[in-house]
Image (cartoon, rainbow, N blue to C red):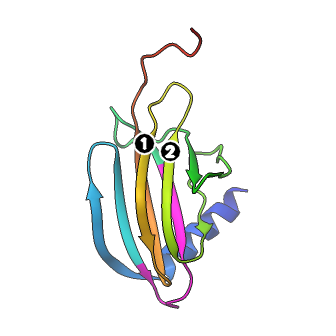
Amino acid sequence: MRIFLTIGLIIIFGCSNKITRNLYTGGKFKLNHYKTKDNFSAKILCDFYHFEFKNEKTIGVMNINGVLMPTPTDYNGIPVNVLPGTFKIESGFLGKKWTVIENLKINAGDSVVIKFYLEDDDRPLID
């Protein structure tokens, strides 16, 4: 499984020319937009980090336009092939606050890498 994730990351970054724009850098996520060399594939890759310790990876889940994506168990993001369009991406986990990105536009030839910084949620899981 690890080899497939590594190959996926190599494909995304190996096929990417450069960062075309950094759309948002804030407390809850960092979004980088790349252009692929083939100009027709489109991908989304999400990585999850602790809010307090920005360099420490954690586990998280993502929901793209209402579809729950597989959760990696080794803290490496899974690249998701998507058709060009507008997306709503939600990310979080048990005991973490959810972050929502609305109206993320992805064109043909785009690769978007999102680093989510998941903040602890102090609310009890059970009332």
Disc 2 marks a residue whose amino acid type is Ser
Relative image position of residue 84 (x, y in whole percent): 53, 77
**Quadrant that contains the N terminus:** bottom right
Placement of 54 over or under 4, stated as above or below? above
The outermost residue toward the right is 1
Residue 74 x/y as whole percent: 62, 45
Taking 126 as reference, is 100 above or below it?
below
Determine the secondary structure under disc 1: strand
Which numbered circle lies on residue 91?
A: 2
Q: Give the residue furthest to the bottom.
A: 38
For image coordinates 40% across by 76% down, the residue present is 34
- Look at the image and say whether residue 42 sits in the magenta stretch: yes
Q: In the figure, residue 17 lies in which quadrant? A: bottom left
Q: Is residue 119 above or below residue 66?
A: above
Specify the label residue 99 is tagged with: 1
Magenta segment boundaries in residue numbering: 35-47
Residue situated in front as seen by the camera: 104 or 57: 104
